[in-house]
Amino acid sequence: MFQPAMSMPAPVGHPDLPVGPEVDTTPSPRPGPVVLAGRYGRVEKLAPAHADDLWAAVEGHDHLWTYMGGYGPFADASEFAAWVADRAGQADPYAYAVVEPSGRAVGLFALMEIRPANRVMEVGHVVYSPAMQKTPLGTEAQYLLARYAFETLRVRRYEWKCNALNAASRRAALRYGFTLEGIFRQHMIARGRNRDTAWFSMLDTEWPSRRAAFERWLDPANFGPDGRQKESLSCPKGGEAIS
């Protein structure tokens, strides 16, 4: 009776040529409908029910959509609600709402470009309403999602990409501890215009130091009676300290 040969690892190249280290090839899980609770709020799966709160938070702030590739600003609450419902039903990007302790949704973002076989995903489609900007919750939401990606979903590489002209997004990426890898020139056409893309990443080996920096910044002891931070968030190697 025929017996199939035992599966053996394939030889890689010439023995005198360098190759990368072996890694665990178990695919990462896909994102799920978790609730990520923090000190200043929470992150939860985006749902159509978030639309009213989110519309109240973003209405009249059309600048928030300037660098979004294919949506916004929205004409009215109905059009926005339809977009939220569509986004809430997608598997990639897998969208989450950012919710204040009061229960009001004030922002959203997503895990996207999900590549389980390589254990890679990106945080993107970040929409922070004015109520979220420059608040502890804005920073904590990024911390909670990154912690979920690295510690639960076991990603090896966590990406951040943005229009190279989006100075605020580039500053945020550095502040959160991502490393700029370069500019992809003429990467895409967005809204009929050229888009060069700034490409950032954070690796699993870097996450422990990034996590420690986030947690130092988020500690209530880092904020004075007026709510102002005492020390800026400074993530090693991701960039200089930025308030």
Image (spheres, rainbow, N blue to C red):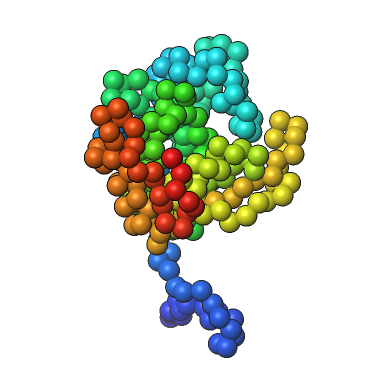
Q: Quadrant of residue 27?
A: bottom left
- 66 over 235 or under it: above or below: above
Q: Position of residue 7 (x, y in %)?
A: 45, 76
Q: Residue sitting at 72 percent across and 49 percent down?
A: 185
Q: Residue sitting at 55 percent across and 39 percent down?
A: 169
Q: Quadrant of residue 136?
A: top left
* Viewport quadrant of the N terminus: bottom left
Q: Position of residue 209 (x, y in %)?
A: 35, 57
The answer to whether residue 31 shows anywhere in this view is: yes
* Pick the front one: 59 or 167: 167
Q: Quadrant of residue 203?
A: bottom left
Q: Residue sitting at 35 percent across and 26 percent down?
A: 99
- 56 over 154 or under it: above or below: above
* Pick the front one: 237 or 95: 237
Among all residues in the image, which is located at the extreme bottom? 16
The answer to whether residue 35 shows anywhere in this view is: no
- 122 over 63 or under it: above or below: below
Q: Residue sitting at 59 percent across and 24 percent down?
A: 63
* Viewport quadrant of the C terminus: top left
Q: Position of residue 65 (x, y in %)?
A: 59, 26
- 89 over 243 or under it: above or below: above
